[in-house]
Image (tube, rainbow, N blue to C red):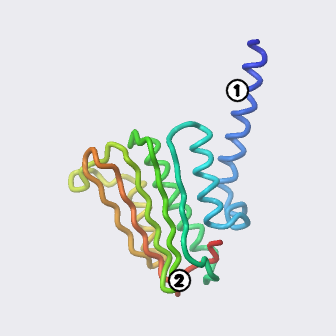
Amino acid sequence: MIALASSKVISESLQEVRALSKSLNTDVILNAGFEDSIQNELNRLKRMKLMEVELTSEGDKGICRNNKDAIILFRIMQEFMSNSVKYSKAKHLEIHLIYTEEELKIQASDDGVGFDIETVKNGAGLINMKNRAALIESTFSLTSKPNEGVKLQISYPKSKRAVLN
């Protein structure tokens, strides 16, 4: 019985290491596409039973200018998800992608403990998200209040958009 349980833990651990490795490999992300890479990260959180997750998408993904921007957007979202796991004590994480003719709107939120945006010290993660968004000429907004979770909004202009499908 103990050997069987140990074998299951080892198998699950190897599966998580493989999933993590895929989320860190830029080529894998480019091959899978932006949206599928986001879904893979959410599936990983779900398998680890860390929180309930949901990804919704609307509109035509269309063709965009370059893949480097897709990687940058993915890394911003990866940081948001990581922060939700590490700090928020959230039970739910939602990401909504809205593809329009002018832009890609990304809305992400968790229902965690939140924080006072005015008094929180800007850590490396928050600074990196802001800087990455600026690098691809996107608007970036992070809002939070204690006990009200965190909300992220990114607007990525179509003229700068990468292949995101």
Q: Position of residue 129 (x, y in %)?
A: 43, 62
Q: Residue at x 74, y 26 (%)?
A: 8
Quadrant placement of the C terminus: bottom right
Q: Residues within 10 Å of mark 1 (few under 14, many from 20)?
A: few
Q: Position of residue 145 (x, y in %)?
A: 25, 51
The reply to whether dot 2 and dot 1 touch (C-beta < 8 Å) is no
Which residue is under mark 2?
160
Which residue is under mark 1?
9
Q: Residue at x 48, y 54 (%)?
A: 79
Mark 2 lies on a secondary structure that is helix
What is the C-alpha distance between the residues marked 2 and 1?
44 Å
- Residue 75 lies, with reference to residue 147, above or below; the image says below
Of labels 2 and 1, earlier in sequence is: 1
Q: Residue at x 59, y 67 (%)?
A: 71
Mark 1 lies on a secondary structure that is helix
- Residue 133 lies, with reference to residue 146, above or below; the image says below
Q: Position of residue 1 (x, y in %)?
A: 76, 12
Q: Position of residue 93 (x, y in %)?
A: 46, 50
Q: Residue at x 43, y 70 (%)?
A: 154
Q: Residue furthest left?
A: 118
**Amino acid under label 2?**
Lys
- Residue 134 lies, with reference to residue 56, above or below; the image says below
Q: Residue furthest top?
A: 1
Q: Residues within 10 Å of mark 2 (few under 14, many from 20)?
A: some
Relative horizontal placement of residue 135, taking residue 68 as reference (left or right): left
**Amino acid under label 1?**
Val
Residue nearer the viewer, 43 or 136: 43
